[in-house]
Amino acid sequence: MKLRIRGSRYLFVLPCLAVLVGLVIYPLIYLINMSISVQDLTTGQLRFAGIVNYVRFFSDPRLLNAITVTVLYVVGVVISQLATGLVFGLLITSLSKYQKPVLIMCITPVLIAPILTGFMWSQLLDTTFGVINYALVEIGLLSSMSQIRWVTDPVLGVLTLLLVDGWQWTPFVGLICIAGLLSVPAELHEAADVDGLTRWQRFRNVTWPYLRPIMLVGLLFRAVDTARNLDLLYTLTRATPGGGTEALAYYIYRTGFEYFDMGYAAAMSWVLIAIVSVFTYLLVRTVEWAK
Amino acid sequence: MKSVNLAKVGRYVFIVIFVLWSLFPIYWIAATSLKGTDEAIMIPPVWFPATLHLENYLNPVPIQDPYRGWTGVIDSVICAVGAASLALVLGLFGAFGFSKLNIRGTNGFLNWILSVRMLPVVAVIIPIHMLFRSLYLVDTYWGIWIAHLYFNLPFCVLMLKSFFDAVPTDLIESAMVEGYSNSEVFRKIALPLITPGLATTFFFSFIFSWNEFLFQWLLTKSSVRAVMIVIPNVIKSPGTEYWNVMSAIGVISFVPVIIAAIVLQRHLVKGLTFGVIKR
């Protein structure tokens, strides 16, 4: 005789949901509480302060800068990695031999910790000892090693970020493209052959409809990760305060853990959460969970 | 005919450039890790170290950090294995439930779980820091294991669900008709079928934990010291530019990741999109 508990299936999902709810609800409530408080410097106690922290947004050019940097960074990543990833995917799938070894070599950067990626590239791009500027001097493009300041230059900084981020993540977007390219049914390609479509027509009408939804998911993943990225910046540019690579996540980190201005950091966290939520919402709308 | 060949050559050139571009930084850090301290910052740069300074790997002394040689690696392993195991166990049941047990509102729950995975760590780290301090979880393995649930638990639920989805529903239903209870179906039928998926999920969680920065950076002090936070810690205090030793630490901390990249290669898209893109 077996004991059947009604609703026992809910016991399966309950533990993980309970843990997640706890992990999310507590910090977010605390975050609200902190964002409407100021910390008393002598006692360390939180004191209610209303919307003071939020009002500060409007007189803080550094926040505006941080948001701009974040948006530029996200838009740059999405556009550049869409393009390079697609080229990568098309190139790899066109290979008749050695697809696998080439893929393995190219995807290695994907799993390397962003912290390390930043360290690696800051060595390569160093203005005193870096091999890249050395090479540029050797071939005559630069007159001195310190002529191009890859990471500290206010304008170049974001481009350098895009370059390094692209080094790490283009293969990921490329892999997603490959998944999309392979999801086109073979019959459609045959039909296209029969109809004598040009290569562009074939890409536009046969491949793209299958590629688009998958790439959209991939790029939304990239957008979220870029918007909240801090690790890479921490070791690559070490963002000058208020400078061209101080993205919002970094500014929040600094405010909270270097200036110990927890209330303001908490208030700004909501801006970051809002930005990330936009992409997450789009992602959730795109995803179809299998039944 | 000629133009076709030209296109082909161009394609190969692009691919070779791409491979070199991807591998060069990795080669460079590996080479630097074997150089002497002066050699590492020499102009012109040294392409191949003259003698292999393996001692960089054994004795990272010049670095002012509570980094105690290889114990950092051991700490990282403990953190990552513990965090991945905890998330796997919790996630396993949830994943089975959402995949096979017709939980009401499954889609909504899954969407919510995905959005938890997307939460910016920097936004929750301040409250978590406060909470963990009052619970004495700062600087403990448990602290890291719990904190890493933020990304590992949603990942495990979604990833494992995609593996459970591949188990035929007929199989589950006929077992239920036979009188199997939910937990028997789970233990005797579904679980054995997804063992490879279990390993894949574990590896990915391990990598996510291993590579994680902010929690390990802010929630540990001296008794837990992951290898991933050594480099930022050295960078924080400028003037100590021991590139060779730091590179050695870098290599130590990405060797497991590169091995995993080769092992997990086939599942990379699936893993990095948390099972959303299935392939």
Image (tube, coloured by chain):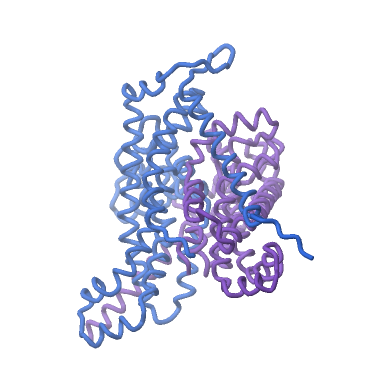
Chain colours: A blue, B purple
**Of A153 and B128, the residue lying toward us:** B128
**Residue at the farthest top position:** A42
Quadrant housing residue A4: bottom right
The correct choice, above or below, for A13 with respect to B120 in the image is below
**Residue at the farthest right position:** A1
The correct choice, above or below, for B277 with respect to A23 in the image is below
Task: Identify which residue is drawn at 40% across, 70% down.
Answer: A178
The correct choice, above or below, for B169 with respect to B102 in the image is below
Residue A212 image offset from top left, x and y in percent: 32, 64
**Of A144 and A207, the residue lying toward us:** A207
Give the number of callouts.
0
Horizontal relation, residue A61 to residue B230: left or right: left
**Of B136 and B246, the residue lying toward us:** B136
Task: Identify which residue is drawn at 31% across, 81% down.
Answer: A188
Residue B34 visible in the current orientation:
no
Residue B52 visible in the current orientation:
yes
Residue A245 image offset from top left, x and y in percent: 37, 38
Quadrant housing residue B137: top right
Task: Identify which residue is drawn at 51% across, 51% down.
Answer: B109
Residue A220 image offset from top left, x and y in percent: 38, 53
Quadrant housing residue A18: top right
Residue B72 image offset from top left, x and y in percent: 68, 46
**Of A99 and A55, the residue lying toward us:** A55
> What quarter of the picture does the N terminus of chain A occupy?
bottom right
Horizontal relation, residue B240 to residue B24: left or right: right
Horizontal relation, residue A15 to residue A273: left or right: right
